[in-house]
Image (cartoon, grey):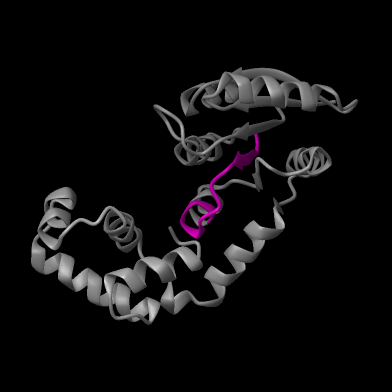
Amino acid sequence: MIRVMLIDDHPVVRAGLRTILDGFPDITVVAEGADGTAALEATREDVDVVVCDIQMPGMDGITATRRLRAADGPPVLILTTYDTQADIVAAVEAGALGYLLKDAPEQALHDAVVATAAGRRTLAPEVAGALAERMSRPTEALSPREIEILQALETGASNRELAKMLFISEATVKTHLVHIYQKLGVGTRTAAITEARERRVI
């Protein structure tokens, strides 16, 4: 029997996942929590797999995954609605063995939990595609800071506003923008945002 801990800040989502997973004869949900801090309890409980969301109040799923792996805790299966390259790469680099989207079929969820418990990596097809695209173009990969700037650009912030938001100079903002444009092969803010969305970077 595979013992699962559910970590999601939405009680309704946790209840639904518990019902689905407990419906399988080889899986049982033994614990749950609303943020990454609760996930760390898995190191002190008899848990085989932690099924964890990414964005949550308090400690997020990426940080929780990293800390669980550092503590030699149980493997983590990320289950989320977020499918950007930034989130996927961050989760994999943090040590997540699996990455599945919440609209996945119930059987896919079952198979992912089983694979994760066995120590096998499992990625949703669209997630694997996004990760492969990112890895196939390493020279074009955006840095975390560049992705942060792109996300801020979506709000329509000016260079001055970006500088204040990120606690850097306007000159540094301009330098980052030049690098972003070069990596994305574009020449304007609007084009950069459009291209980044198409690549699922933001």
Q: Residue at x 28, y 76 (%)?
A: 188
Residue 46 can be seen in this image? no
**Above or below — where is 49 with respect to 173?**
above
Q: Does residue 170 lie above or below 67 as drawn?
A: below
Picture coordinates of residue 57, whole percent (x, y): 41, 27
Q: Is residue 79 magenta-colored?
A: yes
Classify residue 106 by image quadrant: top right
Horizontal relation, residue 158 to residue 153: left or right: left
- The C terminus: image quadrant: bottom left
How far across and down, in percent of the image, does residue 36 sit? 49, 29
Q: Nearer the viewer, residue 22 or 70?
A: 22
| Residue 42 drawn at (x, y percent) | 60, 24
- Residue drawn 64% across and 32% down? 50
**Residue 38 shown left or right of residue 30 in the figure:** left
The picture places residue 58, in percent across and down from the top left corner, at 39, 27
Q: Choose between 156 and 26: the one closer to the eye.
A: 156
Q: Is 182 situated above or below 18?
A: below
Residue 177 in view:
yes
Q: What is the residue that sits farthest to the right in this orientation?
A: 25
Q: Is residue 24 magenta?
A: no
Residue range of the region highlighted in magenta in the rendering: 74-88
For the point 31% across and 77% down, which residue is it?
181
Residue at image position (11%, 51%) is: 164
